[in-house]
Image (cartoon, grey):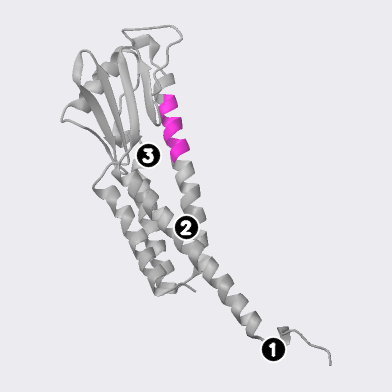
Amino acid sequence: MLTRRARLLMVVAAMLPAAVAFWPLWEVRLLAPQYPEGLGMRIFAYTVTGVKPHDLDNINGLNHYIGMMPIRPDAIPELRYMPWILGALALTALLVAVFNSRRLLGVWIVAFALLGVTGLWDFWRWEYNYGHKLDIENAIIIIPGMTYQPPLIGSRQLLNFTATAWPGVAAFSLGAGFLIAVLVWWTSRARSASSLATRVGADPRHSAQVPV
């Protein structure tokens, strides 16, 4: 059983994924001497946009020179079903609070963790394909052995560009929701163990028998 406070925290954890509707999950920035203000793109759960109005078009134009595939949000299948997955997580968190189920909470935490790891791996795989599968036949600039995979987190030098990537506001919001759920599960587990120990100690059948 969960306390009223724990159930309210799960409602908060359910609301945090709503940030994906307004804030990016990930951001990538590119800096180079010819672009002192930098280029950047923001990856949302449902689309990819430029930081500035023409950034995504400029990035695709540069990528064409080295044979990289263009970034088209409608060609990325994950952007079609990710909002549904995150919506299901939010709904399940609310069900945990409504049904007051610690077991369902445990299932939710495990599912969230697996989805998070799978999402990061899938993003890394997309970046790998994006930076390694080059259209050499139509590339204007060809550097043998050069690949252009951007970093998942941190910075990497790609020719004269410094590419930097980091989680966005929505990713931190999702992480906060996960940590809240883990805290609720841990405190409820400790409370349950303490309650069990109290009941066992109060049971006369478990009292010490003193011989006469």
User: Of the residues tagged 3 and 1, which is closer to the observer?
Assistant: 1
Distance from disc 2 to disc 3, alpha carbons, whole Å, reads 30 Å
Tell me the chief SS of the magenta region. helix
Find out whether the residues at labels 2 and 3 contact each other: C-beta distance under 8 Å.
no
* Residue 77, numbered circle: 3
Q: Write the start and end of the magenta stretch as one range.
A: 120-129
| Amino acid at pointer 2 | Val
User: Of the residues tagged 2 and 3, which is closer to the observer?
Assistant: 2
> Would you name the residue on which mark 2 appears?
182
| Amino acid at pointer 3 | Pro
User: Is 103 drawn above or below residue 65 in the view shown?
Assistant: below
Residue ID at (72%, 85%): 207
Closest to the observer, 2 or 49 = 2
Closest to the observer, 114 or 181 = 181
Work out whether mark 2 precedes mark 3 in sequence or the reverse, and give the earlier one.
Answer: 3
| Residue 91 percent coordinates (x, y) | 37, 62
Residue ID at (48%, 42%): 118
Closest to the observer, 24 or 193 = 193
Distance from disc 1 to disc 2, alpha carbons, whole Å, reads 35 Å
* Residue 204, numbered circle: 1
Work out whether mark 1 precedes mark 2 in sequence or the reverse, and give the earlier one.
Answer: 2
Q: Is residue 210 magenta?
A: no
* Residue 73, numbered circle: none
